[in-house]
Image (cartoon, rainbow, N blue to C red):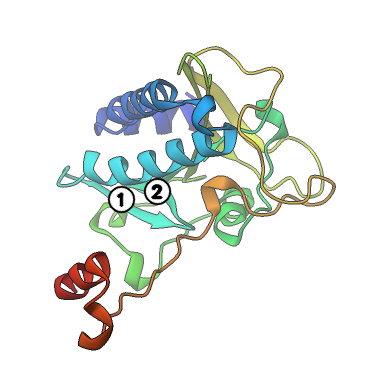
């Protein structure tokens, strides 16, 4: 059994893959149902909806599940189970075209997987009970997902990322998890300079922190909405 087959078997046995796959399919279907180009929706809004829904609903899906922990890294969902670290990324074209240089967290898993004799633990603040045993070799897994903006039909790959900054495949192993294999096209756009190293993607955009201010009584009198917000704050 290959390392990827073994990882998939462990995660399936622990109840990770079935609900995660179901969530991805569900989110793409709903995003396609709500997509209305005539109201200004485009590929970017579709991709952002998918990303935020997967992040928010992913946390709820695994809340309280024994041996499974979720957290956010670079505003992307990360599932931790049995020593494995599973992260989700939208696929921007063919499966071999994926790049890991977009962020430190994005690249870090591929680099760690590429170390010979890898045995690594998270730092104290990130160390959950599921890492108490031996850490599996090539513990970082990536789910690369995409979907049809019209039908909502989703495709997902599961793979072990590889540091390929000096060439070669971005994967040690990768397999089609469900859906139709992606060969051409890029339904969800990359944000940044397409001529250089990929920059921020729609699934790595920072979430703005909006200040909450209480209006002074003299200013609140003529602003019903603001006054209401001020009392709520």
Q: Nearer the viewer, residue 160 or 120?
A: 160
| The C terminus: image quadrant | bottom left
Helix, strand or loop at mark 1: strand
Q: Position of residue 39 (x, y in %)?
A: 49, 31
Instruction: Specify whether residue 82 is in view.
Output: no
Q: Residues within 10 Å of mark 2 (few under 14, many from 20)?
A: many
Q: CA distance from mark 2 to mark 1?
A: 6 Å
Report if the CB atoms under discs 2 and 1 are less than 8 Å apart: yes
Instruction: Specify whether residue 59 is in view.
Output: yes
Query: Which residue is label 2 attached to?
Result: 78
Q: Residues within 10 Å of mark 1 (few under 14, many from 20)?
A: many
Identify the disc placed on residue 31.
Answer: none
The residue located at (21%, 75%) in the rendering is 230
Q: Position of residue 112 (x, y in %)?
A: 57, 54
The residue located at (40%, 51%) in the rendering is 135
Q: Is residue 61 left or right of residue 136?
A: left
Residue farthest right in this picture: 195
Q: Is residue 89 above or below residue 193?
A: above
Q: Is residue 121 above or below residue 26?
A: below
> Where on the picture, by quarter, is residue 214?
bottom left
Query: Which residue is label 1 attached to?
Result: 70
Q: Nearer the viewer, residue 215 or 25?
A: 215
The residue located at (44%, 36%) in the rendering is 50
2 or 1: tag closer to the N-terminus: 1
Q: Position of residue 136 (x, y in %)?
A: 43, 46
Helix, strand or loop at mark 2: strand
């Amino acid at each position: 059994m290959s390392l990827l087959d073994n990882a998939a078997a462990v995660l399936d046995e622990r109840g990770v893959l079935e609900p995660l796959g179901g969530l991805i399919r569900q989110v793409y279907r709903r995003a396609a149902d709500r997509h209305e180009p005539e109201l200004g929706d485009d590929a970017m809004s579709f991709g952002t909806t998918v990303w935020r829904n997967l992040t928010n609903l992913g946390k709820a899906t695994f809340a309280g599940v024994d041996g499974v922990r979720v957290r956010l890294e670079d505003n992307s969902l990360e599932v931790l189970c049995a020593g494995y670290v599973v992260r989700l990324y939208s696929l921007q074209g063919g499966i071999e075209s994926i790049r890991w240089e977009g962020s430190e967290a994005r690249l870090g898993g591929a680099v760690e997987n590429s170390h010979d004799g890898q045995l690594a633990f998270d730092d104290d603040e990130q160390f959950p009970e599921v890492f108490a045993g031996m850490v599996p070799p090539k513990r970082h897994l990536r789910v690369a997902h995409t979907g049809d903006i019209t039908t909502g039909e989703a495709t997902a790959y599961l793979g072990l990322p590889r540091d390929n900054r000096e060439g070669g495949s971005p994967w040690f192993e990768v397999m089609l998890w469900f859906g139709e294999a992606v060969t051409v096209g890029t339904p969800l756009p990359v944000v940044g300079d397409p001529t250089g190293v990929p920059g921020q993607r729609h699934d790595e955009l920072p979430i703005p922190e909006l200040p909450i201010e209480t209006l002074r009584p003299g200013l609140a009198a003529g602003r019903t909405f603001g006054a209401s917000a001020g009392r709520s704050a």
